[in-house]
Amino acid sequence: MSSPYLALPQGVSAEQFGRAIAEFRTILGEEHVITDAAVLAPYTKIMLPVADAQHAPSAAILPQDVEQIQRIVAVCNRYRVPVWPISTGRNLGYGSAAPATPGQVVLDLRRMNRILEVDPELCTALVEPGVTYQQLYDYIQERNLPLWLSCPAPSAIAGPLGNTVDRGVGYTPYGEHFLFSCGMEVVLADGQVLRTGMGSIPNSNTWQVFKWGYGPSLDGIFTQSNYGIVTKLGMWLMPAPPAYKPFVVRYPQRTDIERIVETIRPLRIAMIIPNAVVIAGVLWEAGVFVRRSDYYQGAGQIDEAAVARIMKEHDLGYWNVYAALYGTPEQIEVNWKIVEGAFKASGGEILTENEVGHSPVFRYRADLMRGNMNLQEFGLYNWRGGGGSLWFAPVSQSRGSETLKQMEMAQRILKKHGLDYVGEFIVGWRDMHHIIDVLFDRTDPVQMQSAYACFDELLAEFTAAGYGNYRTNTAFMDKVANTYGPVKRDVDRRLKRALDPNGIIAPGKSGIHI
Ligand code: ADP
């Protein structure tokens, strides 16, 4: 019982684990192998409605190069010790830095943080896992390169490699990050190093410009998976446009959402609006800078009267649409006429930087849509306080008729569990992501139970209605994998057995086990 470790990998004795740790120390040096529970604390912090112990790591190890990772996987195979790779480890609301199952060794790649190349002519970059968006942003600014990044909301502290391999998204025209990636380097479980696409051709200089290479295209199988450890990622960067025009369109009624999406879809498909359009619900907007307790002290879900007061006092729509135009001033002028006409016809109030540039809510969105660093979305966690967050993220067609019914279903289920609807719709090229942040107080055991039950019910009902989640947190990976059916699970597992027969890389990731 007196194991010196916070947790142990499944089926591995403390003695066997101790031997693996000793070998990791030989490879990495004492200071890069952490087993002390106090020092491991940053890797154990989760926002999920389950006990910390369910995701407690046994250790964290921090390699500095590919060769060390190859030696690490050899040790892992020998002792059957699994590693959970993270790049910057800020996967907040999806599991943070903690593993899917207890006892895995966190493989923290933050020391591998070189920006290997930025080509301002081809607008490409090649980065290592530990590179943060802030670091890449600074690199570009310091050299005055005419390039823009696309980053997720917690931009500054997260990184392009981790975000892309988990299929995260941003808010510029390059916001589908995996779509705009080009070439990976992957350490496989047997220690071989694979370069995808053109990266397998010796002396090739096309790794970051042509995605497909020859034969089966493999990049996708290394995203949201546990088939390899990604050590380099190529990405396409957006050339800085000569002009940029962010705007917001406000709508007062809950039911306006149907015609909002009908207005946006054709503009998105024709790429008149080239970036993913966010339709933020009032509580999402307010949550960034308002506390719930200032408006509502009653039991259960916040009521409509309090929501109306928030809208009025903070000058918010029930729905707040954010999008932008990019290009030359002439191009923007032509497209603005089309966009303005369409939104006016749908009854929205359109405001540009001239009118609302001073507002912190607008500034935050305007920054995101041009890939500037910003951390404001973390304000959402103050809405209730207590550090609980689960992202529920079903995908639908981008049609107005898909919106209200989803929202009503979510609101009803959240209400049953005493939780608020803090949501937004994001209109992609043809799809729409409905993002709901299930916020709860982790210090309150009742809310912990409610949040878990609520997420379960959201998943069951949305699945029954034909909606699948595009990404999920480490507590629900098996359940979400089940929603995609037995054939998909079987193929995932067969690939796992072929590439990682001892199951040493991230068991449980996306519900994939050997
Ligand atoms: P971010 O800090 O950008 O949110 P993370 O580093 O937390 O990203 O990575 C998100 C998830 O992606 C991790 O939990 C892990 O499952 C997976 N992941 C991250 N880096 C790698 C990698 N180098 N190889 C394989 N999977 C990775």
Image (cartoon, rainbow, N blue to C red):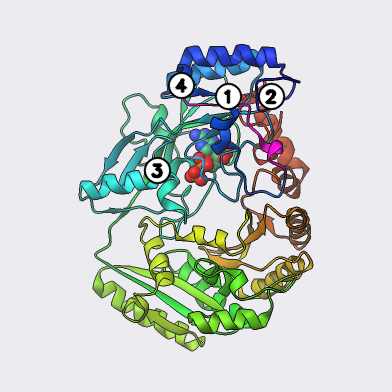
Disc 3 marks which residue? Answer: 132
> In the rendered image, which quarter contains the C terminus?
top right
Pointer 4 residue Cβ closer than 8 Å to ligand 1 = no
* Residues packed near mark 2 inside 10 Å, few (<14), some (14 to 19) or many (20 plus): many
Q: Do the residues labelled 1 and 2 touch (CB within 8 Å)?
A: no
Of 172 and 445, which appears nearest the observer?
445
Rendering coords of residue 449 (x, y %): 77, 54
Point out which mark residue 35 bears: 1
Q: Do the residues labelled 2 and 4 touch (CB within 8 Å)?
A: no
Say what amino acid the circle numbered 3 marks. Thr
- Left or right for 303, reference 157: right
Mark pair 4, 1: CA separation: 10 Å
Of 367 and 77, which appears nearest the observer?
367
Q: Give the mark nearest the N terminus, 1 or 2.
A: 2
Say what amino acid the circle numbered 1 marks. Thr
Q: In this view, does 18 lie above or below 180?
A: above
Mark pair 3, 4: CA separation: 22 Å
Q: Which of marks 3 and 4 is in front?
A: 4
Q: Give the mark nearest the N terminus, 3 or 4.
A: 4
Q: Which of marks 2 and 4 is in front?
A: 4
Disc 4 marks which residue? Answer: 31
Disc 2 marks which residue? Answer: 8
Of 20 and 223, which appears nearest the observer?
20
Residue at image location 77% in from the left, 64% down from the top: 417
Mark pair 1, 2: CA separation: 11 Å
